[in-house]
């Protein structure tokens, strides 16, 4: 629930929501391009603002990433050569799992307070709304992973060049994970056992991203160059950006009936 | 036909365990599927009191 | 939920195929088809087994152990084919909104999953004596494993949602999203250097294996296909009874034992 801001009774968020959801946007019933982008940008801002108010949610995902990646040296043994070898895979897998854990927050909060229903009937295309929400979600949950991962990589004795490739691969990969994950989140909205079910649905679809991403870092470590893996990641990101919002929007409509 | 004897047939040139393991596993699995379906069908019909 | 079948006025001489789109008319039709497909399955599989064990020659490199191919390849083909078929029915359900399409997709999933599992198991039994390992994480095996996960995800999603309409439509969206895995499996041996052997059966080039072996594989594939049709029709009938249990026609079925 959005707690009303008692210091600012005009509550800018509510104002924005009503502007988003008016059934009659203007008198000539056409939405100009700039109005569309403005509405979407306000949605993006709103999502970011809400997420920043509940900073603990986003921080929890980050902490999970840090803690779970440190489990591996503790469990497998901290020999430096070994850690360097397993680092790309371990960091990629824990980043992937962190992304997956954060998916629950993508639609659930809006669903709970009725905002999602309003978004469904708003004049803006649902596909674009979903895309914007997913991007906002990635900025909050995925981008911090990209920024922290090189620090964790240092704990695994990764050299500087590998760290750069790791960050780049995560930069390309985590948005794809958020986009593909949005489909899973939309499909399981409000379903009991949602967390595990999302994992079951989304992990098979995550595997190509993981293989390309971790593969790019490993390839650069062994001297073969990360170009192939990074190109494949870029392609996957493009394809997910184009197709995932459609699937997620369709899934949202089905889940909300 | 190039099996000289029954035991040769079962041995499969040394690969008997793997060949018969695969075929046996498949037969068991498919038989289980059919049996499970028959049971499901019986329960569905019984719930609706359809003869069968 | 009762539906009335809209029968468009047709020429008496032409069969009204649309009639069979209703569960009510499909149920007895399926019942009549099952024995035919069952017998076809028995006969074809018997012939296929005869070819596999008595007509196909001993392989130069792999001795008698290669005979697993007569199970492994047909089950793998079927695992992919059944998923595509399931996705087609899912798509038909979403576009035409016909309940029977969803019921068929639901009926296909478990059989498809079983064949995927059999493909993996027979593949392991073949791999161990030939290449010394029960499993490798190469592209083809991994993507076939992913196919199994996709089937499981589809089945889990459907059974987790109580509302039948939403369950059908959500899992249909998921099935369609997962279809992208099928070309990955098929082309994986061409795109990546894998332990799994490359394509030996091609539509255009002459096959690189003895003709008898090829025929044996095709006959077994056909036999298992007949089996899967029979089993899917059986399951579809059960699904129809379960989901239509409140409708009048179900409660007035008189079936001879």
Image (cartoon, coloured by chain):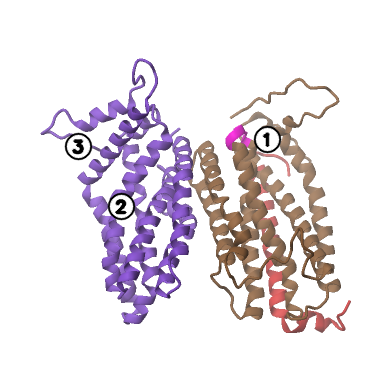
Chain colours: A purple, B red, C brown
Residue at the farthest right position: B1
Mark 3 Cα-neighbour bin, 10 Å: few <14, some 14–19, many ≥20: few
Query: Depth-wise, is mark 1 or mark 2 nearer the camera?
Result: 2
Looking at the rendered structure, the secondary structure element under dot 1 is helix
Which quadrant holds the C terminus of chain A? Answer: top left
A178 is within the stretch colored magenta: no
Relative to A97, C144 lies left or right:
right
- Can you give x and y, in whole percent of width and height, for residue C53 in the image? 82, 72
Q: CA distance from mark 3 to mark 1?
A: 50 Å
* Disc number for residue C23: 1
Query: Depth-wise, is mark 3 or mark 1 nearer the camera?
Result: 3
- Can you give x and y, in whole percent of width and height, for residue A92 in the image? 38, 64
Q: Quadrant of residue C10?
A: top right
Toward the viewer: B18 or C76?
Answer: C76
- Can you give x and y, in whole percent of width and height, for residue C177 in the image? 53, 47
- Can you give x and y, in whole percent of width and height, for residue A240 in the image? 46, 48
Query: Looking at the image, do the residues carrying marks 3 and 1 touch, with CB atoms under 8 Å apart?
Result: no
Position above or below: A22 against C75: above
Badge 2 and badge 3 both on one subunit: yes
Badge 3 and badge 1 both on one subunit: no
Toward the viewer: C144 or C184?
Answer: C184
Judged by its main secondary structure, the magenta piece is: helix
Position above or below: A255 against C77: above
List the residue tagged with mark 2: A141
Relative to A42, A90 lies left or right:
right
List the residue tagged with mark 3: A3
Position above or below: B47 against C1: below
| Residues shaded magenta | C94-99
Host chain of mark 1: C
């Amino acid at each position: 629930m959005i707690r009303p801001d008692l210091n600012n009774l005009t509550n800018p968020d509510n104002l924005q929501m009503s502007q988003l959801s008016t059934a009659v946007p203007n008198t000539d019933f056409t939405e100009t391009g700039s109005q569309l982008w403005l509405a979407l940008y306000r949605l993006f801002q709103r999502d970011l603002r809400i997420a920043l108010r509940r900073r603990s949610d986003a921080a929890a995902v980050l902490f999970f990433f840090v803690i779970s990646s440190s489990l591996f040296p503790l469990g497998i043994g901290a020999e430096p050569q070994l850690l360097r070898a397993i680092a790309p895979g371990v960091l990629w897998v824990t980043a992937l799992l962190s992304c997956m854990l954060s998916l629950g927050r993508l639609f659930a909060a809006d669903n709970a307070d009725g905002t999602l229903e309003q978004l469904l009937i708003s004049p803006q295309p649902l596909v674009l709304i979903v895309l914007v929400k997913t991007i906002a979600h990635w900025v909050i949950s995925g981008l911090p992973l990209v920024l922290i991962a090189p620090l964790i990589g240092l704990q695994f004795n990764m050299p500087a060049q590998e760290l750069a490739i790791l960050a780049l691969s995560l930069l390309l990969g985590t948005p794809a994970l958020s986009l593909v994950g949005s489909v899973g989140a939309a499909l399981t909205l409000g379903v009991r056992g949602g967390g595990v079910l999302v994992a079951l649905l989304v992990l098979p679809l995550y595997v190509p991203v993981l293989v390309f991403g971790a593969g790019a870092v490993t390839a650069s470590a062994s001297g073969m160059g990360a170009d192939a893996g990074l190109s494949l990641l870029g392609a996957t990101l493009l394809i997910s950006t184009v197709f995932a919002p459609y699937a997620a929007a369709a899934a949202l409509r089905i889940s909300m009936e | 036909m190039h099996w000289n004897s029954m035991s040769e047939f079962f041995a499969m040139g040394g690969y008997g365990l793997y060949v018969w393991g695969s075929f046996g596993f498949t037969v068991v699995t498919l038989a289980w599927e059919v049996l499970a379906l028959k049971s499901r069908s019986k329960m569905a019909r019984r719930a609706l009191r359809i003869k069968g | 939920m009762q539906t009335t079948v809209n029968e468009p006025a047709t020429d008496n001489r032409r069969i009204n195929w649309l009639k069979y789109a209703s569960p009510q008319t499909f149920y007895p039709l399926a019942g009549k088809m099952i024995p035919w497909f069952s017998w076809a399955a028995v006969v074809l599989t018997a012939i296929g087994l005869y070819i596999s064990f008595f007509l196909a020659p001993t392989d130069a490199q792999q001795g008698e152990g290669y005979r697993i191919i007569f199970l492994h390849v047909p089950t793998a083909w079927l695992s992919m084919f059944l998923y595509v078929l399931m996705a087609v029915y899912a798509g038909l359900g979403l576009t035409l909104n016909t309940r029977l399409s969803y019921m068929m997709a639901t009926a296909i999933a478990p059989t498809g999953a079983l064949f995927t599992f059999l493909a993996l198991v027979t593949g392991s039994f073949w791999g161990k004596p030939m290449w010394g390992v029960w499993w490798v994480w190469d592209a083809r095996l991994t993507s076939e494993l992913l196919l199994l996960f996709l089937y499981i995800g589809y089945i889990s999603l459907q059974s987790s949602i109580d509302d039948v309409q939403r369950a059908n439509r959500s899992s249909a969206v998921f099935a369609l999203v997962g279809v992208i895995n099928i070309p990955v499996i098929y082309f994986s041996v061409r795109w990546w250097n894998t332990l799994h052997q490359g394509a030996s059966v091609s539509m255009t080039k002459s096959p690189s294996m003895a003709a008898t072996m090829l025929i044996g594989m095709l006959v077994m594939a056909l036999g298992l296909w007949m089996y899967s049709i029979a089993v899917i029709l059986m399951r579809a009938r059960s699904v129809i009874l379960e989901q239509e249990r409140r409708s009048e026609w179900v409660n007035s079925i008189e079936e001879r034992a």
